[in-house]
Image: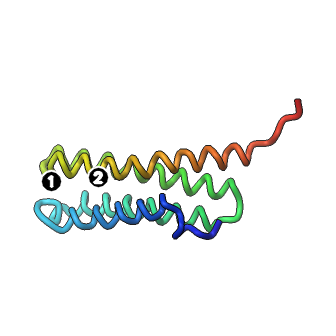
Amino acid sequence: MGNFKNLRVWQDATDLAVDIYAICRSGKFSVDYGLRNQIQKAAVSISSNIAEGDERGTNREVIHFFNIAKGSVAEVITQLHIAHRINYINQATLEELEDKAEKIRAPLKNLIKVRVSNHSPKTKG
């Protein structure tokens, strides 16, 4: 714990946030303050919650913040689909960014599963 910058999932989440900011700088996206701000906040939330969770002292707190990060991935994916349906981004951009988001969500699910199994009380058998 405490080495969040070395976590591949944190690095990927930070890259995704940078990509989200880039698509929000042009076209219709740049003037839709509501959706633009929402997707940017959700994207930043992913890496921020990974970092915060990794800095926490207990498995319970780590699990909590990693779950928030995973929820933020789902938000970003949802907002990307909305942006595509209202013609702010094209199909290729949607697929590229959704793929990047899925490559964050899967490792988060695994990290949470590992933490939950480490946190669960052992039963004597």
In the image, 94: left or right of 125? left
- In the image, is 75 to the left or to the right of 97? right
Please state which of residues 79 and 100 is positioned toward the viewer in this rendering: 100
Quarter of the figure that contains the C terminus: top right
What residue type is disc 2 on? Leu
Q: Point out which mark residue 88 bears.
A: 1
Label 1 neighbourhood size at 10 Å, few (<14), some (14-19), many (20+)?
many
Q: Is residue 2 left or right of residue 45?
A: right
Q: Secondary structure at mark 1?
A: loop
Which percent across, then down, holds residue 119? 73, 48
Percent position (x, y) of residue 53?
59, 62
Number of labels in the image equals 2
Residue at point 48%, 66% (across, down): 48
Q: Residue at x 16, y 52 (%)?
A: 89
Q: Residue at x 11, y 62 (%)?
A: 27
CA neighbours of label 2 inside 10 A, class few (<14), some (14 to 19), many (20+): some
x then y, percent, for residue 83: 20, 50
Colour scheme: rainbow
Q: Nearer the viewer, residue 51 or 32?
A: 51
With respect to residue 5, does 61 lie above or below? Answer: above
Q: CA distance from mark 1 to mark 2?
A: 13 Å
Q: Name the residue that disc number 2 marks.
A: 97
Q: Callout 1, which amino acid?
A: Tyr
Q: Earlier in the sequence, mark 1 or mark 2?
A: 1
The reply to whether the C-beta atoms of the residues labelled 1 and 2 are less than 8 Å apart is: no
Residue lying furthest right in this view?
A: 124
Q: Which mark is residue 64?
A: none
Residue 76 higher or lower than 121, as above or below: below
